[in-house]
Image (cartoon, rainbow, N blue to C red):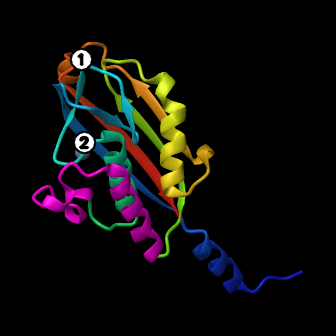
Amino acid sequence: MSFHPLSFFICTKKTEVRIGFGFDVHQLKEGRPFRLGGIEIVHPKGAEGHSDADVLIHAICDALLGAANLGDIGKHFPDTSNEFKNIDSKILLKRVCKLLKKNNFSIGNIDSTICLEKPKIAAYIPSMVKTLTDVMEIEPNNLSIKATTNEKLGFIGREEGVACYAVALIK
Ligand SMILES: [Zn+2]
């Protein structure tokens, strides 16, 4: 059996994968609702920001946009716009997914790490995965959410803020 030399080229072209990286940080303030991974965390402090300040969703949005080379979350949803004041970040994630689709990309898998001193969020992770994979219309197996403390060091260790890193593969 012989292959036309072009068939390999066409095949690799079809399965091109691209990688993107996202990072986000928000301050934690007393009395704010704590939205994280599309759900509400029970805690005396919550993340502060122009939108609902969901660091995990924002990091994922930036990773997806970065993979597609479509700029960043601030470009698409500026914090100077009233449209995005207190907006549910799941709406932003949905819009990012639509933008990717429009540019002929589909999501491969996403890995993320939330850096937070308190509270412990392990018990919330299955619910975050279900919520976010429903929004992105991907299999739960394609979203990994991990959590770590900052060993009491720095602003995260002092419980002044929460940060998140995410990487995404798109096809
Ligand atoms: Zn953010």
Mark 1 lies on a secondary structure that is: helix
Q: Which residue lies under the disc numbered 2?
A: 53
Q: Main secondary structure of the magenta part?
A: helix
Residue 55 in picture, x, y percent from top left: 30, 40
Residue drawn where x is 47% and y is 28% of the image: 124
Q: Is residue 109 visible?
A: no
Other residues around mark 2 within 10 Å, as few (<14) / some (14–19) / many (≥20): many
Which mark is drawn over residue 40?
A: none
Which image quadrant for residue 16?
bottom right
Q: Is residue 21 visible?
A: yes
Which image quadrant for residue 158?
top left
- The residue segment tinted magenta is 73-102
Residue 102 in picture, x, y percent from top left: 44, 76
Quadrant of image for the C terminus: bottom right
Above or below: residue 77 compared with residue 155: below
State the separation of the CA atoms marked 2 and 1.
19 Å
Please identify the residue farthest to the right as the structure is shown: 1
Mark 2 lies on a secondary structure that is: loop
Q: Which residue lies under the disc numbered 1?
A: 157
Quadrant of image for the N terminus: bottom right
Q: Amino acid at mark 2?
A: Ala
Nearer to us in this view, 51 or 13: 51
Residue 104 in picture, x, y percent from top left: 49, 75
Q: Does 138 lie within the magenta span?
A: no
Above or below: residue 7 compared with residue 41: below
Judge: label 2 CB < 8 Å from ligand 1.
yes
Residue 48 in picture, x, y percent from top left: 18, 36
